[in-house]
Amino acid sequence: MSGEPTDSRIRLALTIAVWLGLAACVYSIAADNLAQWDFNVYYSAAHALAVGETPYRPIHPHPGLAGDLIFQYPPLTTYLFYWTNLLSLESAKLAWLGLKLAAVGVLAWIWRRDFERVDATWPIALFIALGFNATLLRDFVTGNISTLEQVGIWLGFAMLVRGRPYAAAAILAFVAQFKLLPAAFLVLIPLVRPRDGWKAFLLGCGLFVGLLGLNFVLSPHLTHDYLSQFTNANVRMDDRGINNPSSLALFRDIIDLTAWVPGLSYNREAGTRVYLFYIAALVLILIRVTSGRVRRVLNSDPRLIVYLGCALFAVAMPRMKDYSYILMLIPALFVIRDLRRSEGQSYLLIALGLMVLAQPQQTNVPGLQVLIYMLQAYLPLSVAAVVMVYVLRLMLRTAHELQPSRDEVAQVSTASIITDSAVS
């Protein structure tokens, strides 16, 4: 009994220390004039639109960046940044950072209410801040819209698991107007609700296309500029490594390494071809492992289907920026908590993490430095693949325990699996 207060004080001290460290980190971002360079682009685009110029003009907001940056969202989204015309760049950056801090609070509320237990204790705070190569803090540093985008995505997921597919479809269709790729999450609607979700899915698809089509109707010239900027050589669409740990970037990096191997012919386009083969193989494997069990798998807890969808998105999308892995924090948290039942696997993951973090500055071992760099840079992608496999195996293993009726899913054992892991 005497040890409990001491343990409580230690936990409290660690929690305070972690939060003070995170506060100092956020303060340093706010005080850095060169930080939030993506927001510089949004600010520049809104001001250009206000004076009748095209928002799709290249700017160079940070001397450390290779090449220029260009506003990459459809024309109508520019109006959502129109408020920045009322502020100086410095004040607008502070307001933007404040909005994103508020968005983190909203995200935590959504996650805790409908998905996994998220609290202010030091392990959770560290995981949310530093997980997936510090994906959340990277979004703060770059000033991207990703944190706010994730609020919309997870709000859509929350509506879906709460049995409101039409609200989920509308929210996801709107959120996808920025980066377009999140429209793929509309597919989760008929998967979570196989009996009546098709209407909501079709409505979401129609709404997504309709909202996107408004750009052609209301701003045809700016829409032309928007489409043209994708072919601009200055746009950094081929980011790789730690800035874009996607599967396409990984295959391109691996193929580029062959240029240094004597006797091997180098083909720059081979990485893209390998990626297409990888996507086809991924689809075939999913079809194979779920063959004959599709109906039972779809009767899994809706949250498991959402987690699997997030992991599939991460491992399949051709572009998955470092800050986009905020999407994977909650699915990974679920897997980590479930892994606590098998300590051996947990120790294996810890050992792998230490190996990846221990990058040698200099080594005489051929290829070792490149290998460890690749492990570090693409660690988020690797973890997303582990989460995908783990959740899918869990769904297949527990599918036979579930009732076929969708109305009874909330009362069956798979729901208790997630609840128990959240409590633990």
Image: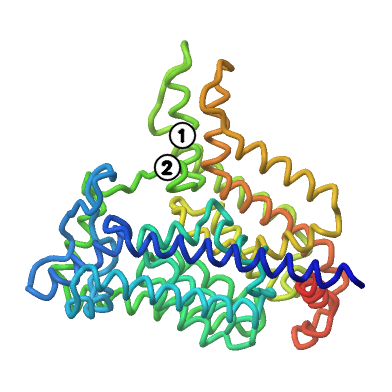
Q: Quadrant of the C terminus?
A: bottom right
**139 and 54: which one is in front?**
139
The answer, for residue 388, to whether it is visible in the render is yes
User: Residue at image x 21%, y 68%?
Assistant: 89
In percent of width and height, residue 69 lies at 24, 53
**113 and 219: which one is in front?**
113
In percent of width and height, residue 100 lies at 42, 73
Mark 2 highlights which residue? 240
Q: Secondary structure at mark 1?
A: helix
Residue extending farthest to the top is 263
Specify few, some or many for label 2: CA neighbours under 10 Å numbering under 14, 14-19, or 20 or more. many
Specify few, some or many for label 1: CA neighbours under 10 Å numbering under 14, 14-19, or 20 or more. some
Q: Secondary structure at mark 2?
A: loop
Residue 253: which numbered mark, if any?
1
Quarter where residue 163 is shown: bottom right
Report how many numbered discs are placed on residues in the image: 2
Residue 61: which numbered mark, if any?
none
Tell me which amino acid carries mark 1: Asp
Tell me which amino acid carries mark 2: Arg
Q: Are marks 1 and 2 in contact (CB under 8 Å)?
A: yes
Quarter where residue 402 is shown: bottom right
User: Residue at image x 43%, y 52%?
Assistant: 319
- Judge left or right: residue 47 versus residue 376: left
User: Residue at image x 46%, y 11%?
Assistant: 262
User: Residue at image x 12%, y 76%?
Assistant: 50
